[in-house]
Structure formats: C-alpha cells, structure tokens
Amino acid sequence: MEVKESILNGLKLKKLTGPAFRGAIAGFYSALSDAGKRRVNREIALSVIKTCTVSERENRARPVDASNVKVLAVNHAGPLDVTIEWMTSPDKTLELSGCRIDPGGDQINVSKVFSHFDEKIALVALAGKKGDIITRAWENGFLNPNIVTSLIRSGDEGTPAAIYNVIDGETLPGMFGFEEEPRTEILEDIDTEVLSSLAIMSKDGSDNIWMVLSAGGPIRYDRKLACYASLVKRVKKEYPGRVKLLIDFKFMSRTEEAMSVLEIPRDKPQDIIKPNLEEFLEIIVSSGLAGSGLPPRNAVTEKDISSYAIKLRDKYNLLGVLVSMDRSGLMLVMSDRIIREKGIKIEQVSPTGAGDALKAGFLYALSNGRSFEEAVHTGNLFGAATASMEGTQTVTPESLSATEALARAQYTRPVIEFRTPENR
C-alpha cells in the first residue's frame, strides 16, 4: 500500500489536502482508541518502510560488558519515528515529497548520540516483538558496538510508530498512540537488568556513574505500577549515594506521574531533573510552589524560572534543576550557582529529538569529568545541532562542528550567577 493511500484509508479521507489533513488529525485520529491509533500508525509506517526500501544492517557482534561505562540509559518504550514530507500541488492536494524513518524514544536518542561520538553507553530498553517488521527497522537504526544493549521483549506487539507529517515545511501535530500497560513481570525484567548493569558499572568503586530515564512516555500511567518511581526507589536502595540520576519528563506524562518520582525521599542531593518550560510550570503548580498562581507562559521571565527552580531544588533535595527553554536557551539551577546560556540561532529543520540530544550532551560532558558549565554548553550545542537536522536524526561530529561555529560567532557561552549564603 502506498503512503498516500494508507493515510487516506487510515484517516478516512476522500481527498488529501492540507486543511483536511489537519482536521483529520485533530478530530478523527484523536478520537480513536489507543489500539486504533496504533493500528493506523502501523499501516502508515509499513507503507513508509516499503517506500524507503530499508536494507538490513549487518548483524555485528555487540559488547556485553558494561564495565568502564559511566552512563546507563533506561528506556521503557520507544517508537519508530516516521517523518513524511508533503508539498501542496497547484490543485491544492498534497503530493509526497519525501519520507524517512529513524529509531526514536528518549534514551534511544541519547544512546545514538553517544555512539556517534564513539563513546560507550549502557542501554536497558523495552523492545517490541522480535522479528516484527517495525521492531526490526527500529532496532537496526540504532544498534551499535558502542551501545551495550539489554533489550526486554514485550512479547505481544511490535514496536509502536510515531508519525510526523510535514506540509510545506510546517510540522503537523504528531500522531501517537499510548502503549498498553506492560505486564508486571516485564517491568521486573527491566528493573533486574538495570540493577545488573549498575552492579557491573560500579565494580571499580567509581562515584561518577549516571543513570538517565524519563518519567513519562508512551506507556499509560498506573499508580499501582508506577514503573518509573519504583525503579528509582530500587536504585536508591541498592546503590545509596553511588548513582546520580538525570530524570527527564515527557510531554505525554501526567503530572501525577512526574510527582511520583519527585516525591521520593533523597538522603543527599544527587538527582538533576530536566523539564522543558511547559513541564516545569506544570510541576511548579502540582508541587504547591506556585502560591497564588503563575503568570501566563508567554509572560514568564528568566527571573521567575530561577526563583521557582530554587524552591523546587530545595523542596526535593535535588542536585539541580535543568530547564530547557526552546530557542531561548537553557538554565541549570544548583545550590551555589545558576548557569544560563542563550539559545543558538540556527535554521531549525526538526526539533524532534533535540531535548534528548541536550541530555546526551550534558551527560557526555559530565561523564568525561567536565564542569557543569561545560555540560550546559555541550547540551546546548548538541540540542541545537539536532534541531538543524531532518526527521529525528541526532547530532553527529559533522553537524556539531557547524553549530560550534555558529555559537562562537554569536558569543554563546555560559553565564554564571554565584549564590552566596545571603541570597540562597
């Protein structure tokens, strides 16, 4: 089935035009059940895979030893990202101008970045059914000798697909479908693999081990399972003071889910959270720190952000709060300093995956013994370079060099505000 035909059938459209497409995504598609969304996305993804004529990668042997690896990435679910580009023809209908597939999903993207820079990283990830066409395309896109991979099979379904349609350069809202809640035994398998990996990574007694995970994503939140919070609790219990956490928050996460991770007692400030601005404001409200309320999103100032981030850091005994602010840059608030860096002016092509690349750059720097100021700058570079690439590709050394040149020309560098005991 051709790509255009699969879109028409899946969204029950008679004619594919820009307005009709937008309306279908906002109406019919959003009204589907999660299973229905996955079915539609799967048909579209299969047609794109056929169009792209994806070739199988050589099945190279991958290392299984996580010793001397400093970063563990945990991914509870990740989609095959499908990007479809359309151009409006003279008769106002849409014609396919290009398509691509990229493995996506939080720490999958982080792992891709590390491998591009020839840096080892350990990855524990929930994968789809073995041998499934979409699962295979997803895995072939990121498996690499630099990624020490432990894949946990869901067993029931293949890897889900996330569909991004771009019309004349404008990206429409993504087409997603939440996955079914994984079985308890699958979550237990993930936790076991995480703890086993950490045991190997910490053999040399290093205290510079980072674990990155997301609170939220394409799995529906269930307070009875609370898979992210339960994993964090186990890590803190079995490796007290040994493992630092970088915790991301995804746009599909309910605030209750984010709070379940934040409210875990912390004996010492070792965790850094990385919300984007929208997620940050939601967390501030849910945590009770907003008081009489927050100003509208478009009226929030950097002073507001730093003030609330200080309160958030103090309330939950965090090492830091790293807020990404899209093109405005990013800010890291710690107990003794606030590190700000303005956004790098780039020609933005696709912002998808830029936040994950920011995390990767931040951890890439810290795991190699660099300062937090350098980590903020590296994260900014990696995120901007990714946003300048098509689809959901992630930064490479080649794309980074161009972004570094832009940053130098724009005098983009960290600005540090030290906090004295008097102003803390």
Image: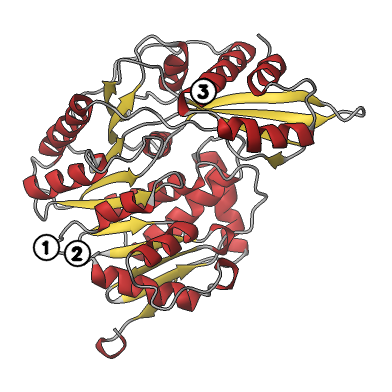
| Residue at 43% over, 55% down | 378
Display colour scheme: secondary structure
User: Which numbered disc flags the more N-terminal residue, 3 or 1?
Assistant: 3
Q: In the picture, residue 167 is in which quadrant?
A: top right
Three-letter code for the amino acid on which mark 2 is drawn: Pro
Q: Nearer the viewer, mark 2 or mark 3?
A: 3
Three-letter code for the amino acid on which mark 1 is drawn: Asp
- Which secondary structure lies at badge 1? loop
In the image, residue 200 above or below residue 213: above
Cα gap from disc 1 to disc 2, whole angstroms: 7 Å
**Residue that badge 2 annotates:** 269
In the image, residue 191 above or below residue 141: below
Percent of width and height locating residue 240: 8, 53
| Residue at 58% over, 37% down | 174
**Residue that badge 1 annotates:** 267
**Residue that badge 3 annotates:** 36
Percent of width and height locating residue 166: 69, 35
| Residue at 64% over, 38% down | 26
- Which secondary structure lies at badge 2? loop
Three-letter code for the amino acid on which mark 3 is drawn: Gly
User: Which numbered disc flags the more N-terminal residue, 2 or 3?
Assistant: 3
